[in-house]
Amino acid sequence: MAERGAKGIVFAADSLAAVAMLAFFITGLAFLSAKTHEDSGAQLLLKKQADDMLAALERTGELPSMNLTALNLSIAATLPDEDSYEIALDYYNYSSGGFAFSHAASAARGNANRSKSVAASQREFVVMANGTVMHYGIATLRVWVG
Protein backbone atom coordinates (compact mmCIF):
# COMPACT_ATOMS: atom_id res chain seq x y z
CA MET A 1 0.00 0.00 0.00
CA ALA A 2 2.85 2.37 0.79
CA GLU A 3 4.25 1.70 -2.66
CA ARG A 4 0.99 2.85 -4.24
CA GLY A 5 1.08 6.20 -2.30
CA ALA A 6 4.65 6.90 -3.44
CA LYS A 7 3.64 6.38 -7.06
CA GLY A 8 0.76 8.77 -6.59
CA ILE A 9 3.08 11.50 -5.31
CA VAL A 10 5.42 11.00 -8.28
CA PHE A 11 2.53 11.22 -10.74
CA ALA A 12 1.18 14.31 -8.98
CA ALA A 13 4.62 15.99 -9.06
CA ASP A 14 5.02 15.01 -12.73
CA SER A 15 1.64 16.45 -13.69
CA LEU A 16 2.34 19.62 -11.67
CA ALA A 17 5.64 20.09 -13.54
CA ALA A 18 3.83 19.58 -16.86
CA VAL A 19 1.21 22.19 -15.95
CA ALA A 20 3.95 24.64 -14.88
CA MET A 21 5.84 24.11 -18.17
CA LEU A 22 2.63 24.62 -20.14
CA ALA A 23 1.95 27.85 -18.23
CA PHE A 24 5.50 29.11 -18.99
CA PHE A 25 5.08 28.20 -22.65
CA ILE A 26 1.73 30.01 -22.94
CA THR A 27 3.12 33.06 -21.11
CA GLY A 28 6.16 33.16 -23.42
CA LEU A 29 3.97 32.80 -26.49
CA ALA A 30 1.71 35.63 -25.32
CA PHE A 31 4.75 37.84 -24.66
CA LEU A 32 6.23 37.18 -28.10
CA SER A 33 2.94 37.76 -29.86
CA ALA A 34 2.55 41.07 -28.00
CA LYS A 35 6.06 42.09 -29.10
CA THR A 36 5.15 41.55 -32.75
CA HIS A 37 2.59 44.34 -32.47
CA GLU A 38 5.42 46.81 -31.86
CA ASP A 39 6.65 48.15 -35.18
CA SER A 40 10.44 47.88 -34.96
CA GLY A 41 10.63 48.43 -38.71
CA ALA A 42 9.59 52.05 -38.28
CA GLN A 43 12.63 52.78 -36.09
CA LEU A 44 14.93 51.10 -38.61
CA LEU A 45 13.36 53.07 -41.46
CA LEU A 46 13.94 56.35 -39.61
CA LYS A 47 17.59 55.42 -38.96
CA LYS A 48 18.13 54.54 -42.62
CA GLN A 49 16.46 57.78 -43.73
CA ALA A 50 18.78 59.80 -41.49
CA ASP A 51 21.89 57.91 -42.66
CA ASP A 52 20.95 58.27 -46.32
CA MET A 53 20.04 61.94 -45.95
CA LEU A 54 23.43 62.84 -44.47
CA ALA A 55 25.28 60.77 -47.08
CA ALA A 56 23.35 62.48 -49.90
CA LEU A 57 23.98 65.94 -48.44
CA GLU A 58 27.70 65.21 -48.27
CA ARG A 59 27.84 63.84 -51.83
CA THR A 60 26.03 66.84 -53.27
CA GLY A 61 28.36 69.21 -51.40
CA GLU A 62 25.59 70.78 -49.35
CA LEU A 63 26.83 69.46 -46.01
CA PRO A 64 30.28 71.09 -46.25
CA SER A 65 28.85 74.24 -47.88
CA MET A 66 27.98 75.70 -44.44
CA ASN A 67 24.73 77.04 -45.96
CA LEU A 68 22.13 76.17 -43.32
CA THR A 69 19.22 77.50 -45.39
CA ALA A 70 20.09 75.22 -48.33
CA LEU A 71 20.54 72.25 -45.99
CA ASN A 72 17.20 72.87 -44.33
CA LEU A 73 15.41 73.18 -47.68
CA SER A 74 17.02 70.00 -49.03
CA ILE A 75 16.11 67.96 -45.96
CA ALA A 76 12.54 69.30 -45.90
CA ALA A 77 12.11 68.53 -49.61
CA THR A 78 13.58 65.02 -49.35
CA LEU A 79 12.08 63.57 -46.18
CA PRO A 80 8.37 62.61 -46.17
CA ASP A 81 5.99 65.27 -44.88
CA GLU A 82 5.04 63.19 -41.82
CA ASP A 83 8.70 63.03 -40.72
CA SER A 84 10.10 65.76 -38.52
CA TYR A 85 13.80 66.38 -38.08
CA GLU A 86 16.51 68.35 -36.36
CA ILE A 87 19.97 68.85 -37.83
CA ALA A 88 22.82 70.11 -35.67
CA LEU A 89 26.16 71.10 -37.16
CA ASP A 90 29.29 71.60 -35.06
CA TYR A 91 32.38 73.12 -36.69
CA TYR A 92 35.93 72.78 -35.37
CA ASN A 93 39.26 74.34 -36.37
CA TYR A 94 42.56 72.52 -36.09
CA SER A 95 45.68 74.16 -34.82
CA SER A 96 48.92 72.86 -33.39
CA GLY A 97 47.17 72.48 -30.03
CA GLY A 98 44.43 70.23 -31.45
CA PHE A 99 40.80 70.76 -32.34
CA ALA A 100 39.04 73.87 -31.08
CA PHE A 101 35.31 74.47 -31.31
CA SER A 102 34.52 77.19 -33.86
CA HIS A 103 30.72 77.51 -34.07
CA ALA A 104 27.45 75.60 -34.31
CA ALA A 105 24.30 75.80 -36.39
CA SER A 106 20.99 73.96 -36.26
CA ALA A 107 17.61 73.77 -37.96
CA ALA A 108 14.46 71.77 -37.21
CA ARG A 109 10.95 70.86 -38.30
CA GLY A 110 8.60 69.60 -35.59
CA ASN A 111 9.02 68.74 -31.91
CA ALA A 112 10.61 65.45 -30.78
CA ASN A 113 9.10 65.62 -27.28
CA ARG A 114 5.79 64.17 -28.50
CA SER A 115 7.33 61.24 -30.38
CA LYS A 116 8.27 57.94 -28.78
CA SER A 117 10.54 56.86 -31.63
CA VAL A 118 13.49 59.07 -32.60
CA ALA A 119 16.40 57.90 -34.75
CA ALA A 120 19.71 59.73 -35.04
CA SER A 121 22.61 59.60 -37.45
CA GLN A 122 25.96 61.31 -37.27
CA ARG A 123 28.47 62.07 -40.01
CA GLU A 124 31.85 63.78 -40.01
CA PHE A 125 32.86 66.01 -42.92
CA VAL A 126 35.52 68.50 -43.99
CA VAL A 127 34.97 72.06 -45.21
CA MET A 128 37.53 72.88 -47.92
CA ALA A 129 38.43 76.22 -49.48
CA ASN A 130 41.13 76.62 -52.15
CA GLY A 131 42.47 73.14 -51.46
CA THR A 132 42.96 73.68 -47.74
CA VAL A 133 40.88 72.47 -44.83
CA MET A 134 38.93 75.34 -43.26
CA HIS A 135 36.81 73.39 -40.76
CA TYR A 136 36.13 69.89 -39.57
CA GLY A 137 32.45 69.33 -39.05
CA ILE A 138 30.13 66.91 -37.32
CA ALA A 139 26.53 66.73 -38.50
CA THR A 140 23.87 65.06 -36.35
CA LEU A 141 20.46 64.45 -37.91
CA ARG A 142 17.58 63.30 -35.69
CA VAL A 143 14.44 62.09 -37.48
CA TRP A 144 11.04 61.18 -35.99
CA VAL A 145 7.43 60.77 -37.08
CA GLY A 146 5.05 63.41 -35.83
Image: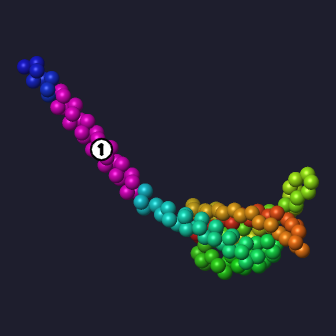
The residue at 60%/77% (across/down) is: 80
Is residue 126 on the magenta stretch?
A: no
Is residue 32 on the magenta stretch?
A: yes
The residue at 24%/39% (across/down) is: 18
Q: Is residue 52 left or right of residue 92?
A: left
In the rendering, at what x and y percent does residue 125 appear? 77, 66
The residue at 18%/27% (across/down) is: 9
Give the image quarter of residue 141.
bottom right
In the rendering, at what x and y percent does residue 123 appear? 71, 64
Q: Which quadrant holds the N terminus?
A: top left
Please tell me whether residue 21 is drawn above or below residue 62 in the rendered image: above
Magenta range is: 9-34
Q: Is residue 111 visible?
A: no
Residue at the top extreme?
Answer: 2
Q: Residues within 10 Å of mark 1 (few under 14, many from 20)?
A: few
Residue position for label 1:
23
Residue at the left extreme?
Answer: 1
Q: Is residue 112 left or right of residue 44?
A: right
